[in-house]
Image (spheres, helix red, strand yellow):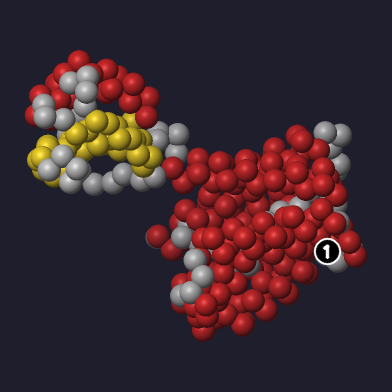
Amino acid sequence: MRIAKDLALMTSGTFLFALSITLLSMPNQLAEGGVAGLSLLLYYAVELSPALVTLIVNGVLLIIGYRLLPRRMVMLSILNIPLLSLFIYFTENLGQPIDDPLIAAIFAGLLTGFGFGLIFRGSSTMGGTSIVARMLNYRFGWDLTATNFVLDLLIVLSGMFVIGPQLTMYTIVALFIGKKATDFILEGINTRKAVNIVSPRAEEIADAVIEKMSASATVFSGHGMYTKESRDVIYIVIQTPRLFYLKKIIEEVDEHAFIVVHNVKDVSGEHS
């Protein structure tokens, strides 16, 4: 059942990503990151089919790096690579130019972001530059995330020589929107914050939070290396819209409390 759900998410996400390429990027001369971006630049320069280029380049990268890649990543890439190429092939003649390239960039970013979000939720990957990044990490110890970002950035910036600086900047807008859309799919609208509070009145603050907000609070001991004093630390995970109210409760008890707020990507399990 889980495998069927993951495959459905992967297929849906790949289809949305293909549509962003064929309906919005191709007819409006926008680029993209990764192998898809390289295929678009070759399409603009020498009119090579993006469906063919993505299939060949991703396939070659997979063959070169399969020994260094996790088995699950290899299996999913074997499914995803031809699927993306097929979707691009069947829809690459459906797109129409839009008068305002900014509108095209915005909606290309949204479709790409939603597509990637579904793919990641299906525990899958798009391969491409992530395969190269993993090979460089294995061979030279390069950081995976940073290497993947640099590779994508180089492909996008090379678009200045093919589609010009203006459309390259629109592409960067699309990539930024795509990142936010992916985060939305992965994290949802109900984002949360983790809050650490250091105060000599930690127990009172925790009681007030439990009473007034019906929220859970965990208190543990900490030791300040600068002051050489022990302090209780409160740890609370709360929905983002309630953060302002939480701060007001803390200030009512101890206006000098030290508060640190962290972004939280995922919360699961029972609170204590």
Give the percent coordinates (x, y) of residue 254. Answer: 18, 21
Residue closest to the eye, 106 or 152 = 152
Q: Amino acid at mark 1?
A: Leu
Q: How many marks?
A: 1
Depicted 243 relative to depicted 51: above or below: above
Query: Which quadrant holds the C terminus?
Result: top left
Q: Residue at x 49, y 66 (%)?
A: 143
Image quadrant in which you'd find residue 239: top left
Q: Quadrant of residue 167?
A: top right
- Residue 155 in percent (x, y) is at 72, 60
Residues packed near mark 1 inside 10 Å, few (<14), some (14 to 19) or many (20 plus): some
Check disc 1 and report the residue beneath it.
42
Which is nearer the eye, 187 or 6? 187
Work out which quarter of the rendered image holds the N terminus and state it: bottom left
Asked if residue 218 can be seen in this view, the reply is: no
Horizontal relation, residue 25 to residue 139: left or right: right
Residue 65 coordinates in the image, percent (x, y): 57, 80
Residue 231, picture quadrant: top left
**Along the line of sight, which residue is nearer the eye, 229 or 199?**
229
Q: What residue sits 22% from the left and 23% below the top?
A: 256
Compared to residue 208, the image places residue 15 above or below, namely below
- Is 29 placed left or right of 235 in the picture? right
Determine the residue positioned at 64% across, 76% down. Answer: 61
Q: Is residue 213 left or right of residue 156?
A: left
**Is residue 35 visible to the viewer in this orientation of the structure?**
yes
User: Residue most toward the right?
Assistant: 46
